[in-house]
Image: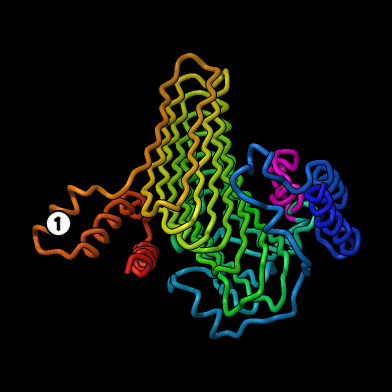
């Protein structure tokens, strides 16, 4: 009974926030009303929810929250978070697009980057916004669709090849407990190419934050998109990050998720392969320690024939931390000649750490090649002994083995500066 009361309290606060702010929100009011209705039915998921059974969202949303902040970062603080020196930079500060700190004045031909609130009359925006992230699939998608205050719209024109990466920097700095809802839409048209990097960081803030971020990515026919997500929040950060992609004929989409820190991180990655001869790659690495909770949920929806998907997620779990991998490959009846492979591997470094892993295949076609597998273990003592026999200390031997374990995912990063940044963060973690 107590749990129900608490759930209703935060649920009611979120609904009340929508009623109070709906007059100032961008976009389609009817869409927001439908999303709010869906959220109202779903509520905050509790431990009895199969999709959220290993992450305590009721606890994460316990207490009083503000829904915006006037706290501002300095130019120097923002600059220190931009680890890609050669990139178009989009700064999302406390959930809101910041044009002052963004570097988008001299864009490549065919590339458009604007605040999402300024894009509502754009034809590509109207064609694609909120068409793929299903508000009935997840309460946080519904909540974001109802309450999103700001974000960015990125449009890559037909046949445009954008060689410079586009770095979306999500920065949080709040003085009191705050809920943020940011929203992005990325549309890469037919025969176009782009690289998107999203990073999440908390800067000089010790107040509790709950960031519910949602990015929709449309990959047009024959388009190529590489997407990277780097999560490096503090012990006060709670992040629900949803990526919803849809691919068209003969497109290629790769997405890479690196969770390096954050008290609670929930990643929802939903991919729809909605035409033939599509290729998709999903890579993930999560490093957890302390009391951190990281929860990765992936869904690859094969809707048409002759498509390939490959998924590799790896985790290293320390201390009393907890990690979850829940990945589903869904092959529909018409998706003949599908090749779909999924692998999840974990290393447990402590007796108090927890890993929950659930790879799933749901197949309704009969001419497919699909596999999934998972493994969890400790560092190989024989390998440690071998390295120590060659002069390495035990700590150095373990560090080397953990780097080798992570390298299979890290090596998939195509941007050298980004790969070096991630490797440096991993090295610091294992010092």
Q: Residue at x 40, y 42 (%)?
A: 312
Viewed as shown, does residue 132 lie left or right of 190? right
Residue 183 picture quarter:
bottom right
Note whether 254 is above or below 27 in the view shown: above
Along the line of sight, the residue nearer the viewer: 188 or 159? 188
Q: Which residue carries the number 1 mark? A: 387
Residue 135 picture quarter:
top right
Labels in figure, total: 1
- Could you tell me residue 118's position as x and y percent? 75, 64
Note whether 167 is above or below 131 in the view shown: below
- Could you tell me residue 302's position as x and y percent? 54, 29
Q: How is the image coloured?
A: rainbow
- Could you tell me residue 355's position as x and y percent? 47, 45
Residue 351 visible, this angle: yes
- Could you tell me residue 100's position as x and y percent? 64, 79
In the displayed orientation, state which residue is furthest to the top. 366
Few, some or many residues within 10 Å of mark 1 (<14, 14–19, 20+): some
Residue 194 visible, this angle: no
Along the line of sight, the residue nearer the viewer: 334 or 13? 13
Q: Which residues are magenta?
A: 122-143
Q: Residue at x 75, y 59 (%)?
A: 148
Q: Residue at x 34, y 65 (%)?
A: 430
SS at mark 1?
A: helix
Viewed as shown, does residue 187 lie left or right of 361? right
Q: Is residue 416 magenta?
A: no
Which quadrant is the C terminus positioned in? bottom left
């Amino acid at each position: 009974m107590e749990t129900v009361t608490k759930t209703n309290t935060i649920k009611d606060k979120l609904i009340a926030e929508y009623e109070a702010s709906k007059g100032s929100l961008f976009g389609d009011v009817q869409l927001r009303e439908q999303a709010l209705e869906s959220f109202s039915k779903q509520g905050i998921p509790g431990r009895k929810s199969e999709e959220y059974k290993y992450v305590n969202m009721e606890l994460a949303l316990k207490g009083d929250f503000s829904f915006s902040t006037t706290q501002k970062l300095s130019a120097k603080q923002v600059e220190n978070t931009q680890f890609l020196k050669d990139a178009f930079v989009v700064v999302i500060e406390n959930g809101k697009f910041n044009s002052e700190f963004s570097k988008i004045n001299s864009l490549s031909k065919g590339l458009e980057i604007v605040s999402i609130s300024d894009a509502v009359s754009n034809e590509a925006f109207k064609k694609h916004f909120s068409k793929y992230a299903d508000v009935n699939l997840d309460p946080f998608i519904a909540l974001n669709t109802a309450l999103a205050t700001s974000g960015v719209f990125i449009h890559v024109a037909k046949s445009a090849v954008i060689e410079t990466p586009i770095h979306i920097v999500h920065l949080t700095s709040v003085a009191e407990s705050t809920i943020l809802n940011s929203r992005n839409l990325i549309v890469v048209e037919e025969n176009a190419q782009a690289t998107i990097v999203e990073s999440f960081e908390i800067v000089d803030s010790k107040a509790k934050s709950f960031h519910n971020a949602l990015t929709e990515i449309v990959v047009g026919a024959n388009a190529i998109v590489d997407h990277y997500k780097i999560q490096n929040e503090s012990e006060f950060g709670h992040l629900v990050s949803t990526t919803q992609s849809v691919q068209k004929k003969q497109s290629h989409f790769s997405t890479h998720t690196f969770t390096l820190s954050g008290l609670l991180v929930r990643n929802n990655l939903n991919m729809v392969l909605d035409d033939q001869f599509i290729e998709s790659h999903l890579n993930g690495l999560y490093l957890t320690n302390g009391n951190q909770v990281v929860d990765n949920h992936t869904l690859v929806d094969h809707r048409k024939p002759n498509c390939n998907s490959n998924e590799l997620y790896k985790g290293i779990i320390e201390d009393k931390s907890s990690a979850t991998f829940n990945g589903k490959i869904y092959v529909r009846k018409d998706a003949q000649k599908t090749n779909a492979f999924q692998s999840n591997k974990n290393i447990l470094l402590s007796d108090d750490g927890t890993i929950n892993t659930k790879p799933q295949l749901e197949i309704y076609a009969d001419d497919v090649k699909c596999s999934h597998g998972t493994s969890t273990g400790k560092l190989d003592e024989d390998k440690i002994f071998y390295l120590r026999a060659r002069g390495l200390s035990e700590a150095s031997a373990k560090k080397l083995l953990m780097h080798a374990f992570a390298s299979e995912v890290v090596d998939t990063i195509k941007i050298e500066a980004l790969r070096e940044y991630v490797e440096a963060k991993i090295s610091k973690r294992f010092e």
